Image (cartoon, rainbow, N blue to C red):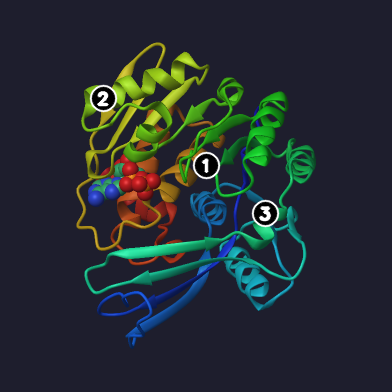
Amino acid sequence: MKPKGVLVVGSITADVTAFSRRFPGPGETVLGDDFTLVLGGKGANQAVAAARAGAPTWLAGCVGRDPFGDLVLAGLRSHGVELGQVRTVGDRTGVAHIRVDASGENDIVIVPLANAAFGADLAEESIRAVRDQVGVLLLQLEVPMATTCHAAKAGRAAGLTVVLDPAPAQALPDDVWRHVDVVTPNESEAGVLTGVRVTDLESAARAASWFLDRGVGHALITLGSGGALSVTAERTRHYPAYPVTPVDTTAAGDAFTGFFGAALAAGLDDATAILRGMAAGALATTAPGASPSLPDLAAVEALISR
Ligand code: ADP
């Protein structure tokens, strides 16, 4: 039997967010209304989502020896993420510097800091360390690209199911795709990577073919309130979204990928894993923030059975 755990290789940040009625113009200072400081980073968010979905979950990543490092480790620990593969390197934990205005619009500066020190050798070491306990490897693009590409190759060689969320979108070396079992871009990421502007199901299917032509087994394009399109060599299937009233769509994609990966690791079929991911993504839009908005398995199952 395949092991049921999930390994996430990815970024960890402290999300530092200031809320103000409007954004300051260049050189201007405005008074804000609120402030939050929470665990973030696509890697950390996916790990929290997978752990909340019930999978034994390891996160491989790097933090710094500073108060933000203590904060993010405490956040991961509180959600039950295994920390044995998190390294402390240097003095500074990665930061996402976020501003949100009254309309909910945001802008973000990500400073990788410790995440930039996450080398391919460390990723491979982590895969070796936990390969007997995990069946699924989740990857994104907020750590050095060479690290993600090497992890895909090493994960495949170790017999893991490799899931790549290509976010934030950037061009990747062509030979990475044959090591990827499932790719989970949203519409805009699919557009950047494939050159196909995704505006409807037909264009999403064309973008999906681009990934399949390069060796990906399953292209799973997430379409926000449009649900998701799943394309393999055998079949194409559209899954409509669960109806919810969104208040903040941050981390919907991370919730989707974390719950999808955890379900695959638990041995559930693709269709069930997609429904779990979609329900988790929908619920993540109904609460503000990133990691604090990630739902648990009970809430996801309740939405699916409703
Ligand atoms: P990302 O956050 O990466 O842009 P999406 O917005 O596509 O990813 O969201 C991932 C999944 O979460 C979608 O496939 C969908 O099932 C669900 N989701 C996202 N936004 C909504 C929404 N407004 N209503 C219902 N479901 C949503």
Q: Position of residue 230 (x, y in %)?
A: 35, 26
* Foreground: disc 3 or disc 2: 3
Which residue is rendered at x = 34% and y = 39% of the image? 188
Mark 3 residue type:
Ala
Tell me the quadrant of the picture where the N terminus can be found.
Answer: top right
> In the image, is 42 to the left or to the right of 70?
left
Mark 1 close to ligand 1, CB under 8 Å: no
- Label 3, on which residue? 116
Q: CA distance from mark 3 to mark 2?
A: 35 Å
* Foreground: disc 1 or disc 3: 3
**How many residues crowd mark 3 within 10 Å: few (<14), some (14–19), many (20+)?**
some
**How many residues crowd mark 2 within 10 Å: few (<14), some (14–19), many (20+)?**
some
Q: Is residue 183 above or below residue 64?
A: above
Q: Position of residue 250 (x, y in %)?
A: 36, 58
- Label 2, on which residue? 203
Q: Look at the numbered disc 3 and give the secondary structure of its residue.
A: helix
Which label number is shown at residue 248? none
Which residue is rendered at x = 68% and y = 61% of the image? 114
Which residue is rendered at x = 39% and y = 30% of the image? 220
Q: Look at the numbered disc 2 and give the secondary structure of its residue.
A: helix
Mark 2 residue type:
Ser
Q: Is residue 279 visible?
A: no
Q: Position of residue 76 (x, y in %)?
A: 60, 63
